[in-house]
Amino acid sequence: MKKVLVVNGPNLNMLGRREPAIYGSDSLATIEARLKALTGELDVKLEFFQSNHEGAIIDAIHATFSNHDGIVINPGAFTHYSYAIRDALAAVRVPFVEIHISNVHAREAFRHTSVLAALAVGQISGLGVYGYELALRGLLRSLES
Ligand code: DHK
């Protein structure tokens, strides 16, 4: 059975209350429960981690080394500038899918860049919270091949 860590970065603990027109009305707990409901069908063990702190996210990524098969990550605003998170993902070499709830390419220019995407298996953006399920399914499919 594959083991996947689902990481959410800064401000994503505020989902449901934060700018609902952009991020929707589902809480992070609801999103995580939906993913958990898929574990039987997908034969995967999921762990969840959220932090507003760059170093804590880096520590969580380091802990996947030799321990997890994949990572689903919404790095929040760290997507756009955290070379430290990029280097952590490069260091552990655990395959990951980057997910954004909103369409970052249709928003402010600073959101158009991801310093992580070039290392990712793939990137999902703009499909709302459904993107988490797609990210998980896509990651697992890529791990099979
Ligand atoms: C979430 C954030 O917190 C933003 O900083 C990103 C992303 C977009 C999202 O769409 O999930 O720019």
Image (spheres, helix red, strand yellow):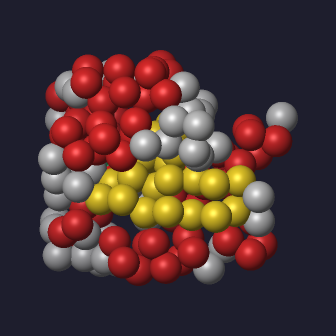
| Residue 81: percent from left, percent from top | 21, 25
Q: Relative to 77, is 93 on the left or the right?
A: right
The answer to whether 33 is drawn above or below residue 5 in the figure is below
Q: Relative to 1, is 87 on the left or the right?
A: left
| Residue 130: percent from left, percent from top | 51, 64
| Residue 30: percent from left, percent from top | 41, 80
The answer to whether 127 is drawn above or below residue 43 in the figure is above
Quadrant for the N terminus, please: bottom right
Q: Relative to 34, is 129 on the left or the right?
A: left
Q: Is residue 127 visible?
A: no
Q: At 17% from the left edge and 76% from the top edge, which residue is drawn?
A: 17
3 or 77: which is nearer to us?
3
Quadrant for the C terminus, please: top right
Q: At 77% from the left edge and 72% from the top edge, which residue is drawn?
A: 41
Question: Looking at the rendering, which quadrant does residue 13 occupy?
Answer: bottom left
35 or 19: which is nearer to us?
35
Question: Looking at the rendering, which quadrant does residue 80 occupy?
Answer: top left
The answer to whether 68 is drawn above or below residue 129 in the figure is above
| Residue 129: percent from left, percent from top | 44, 64
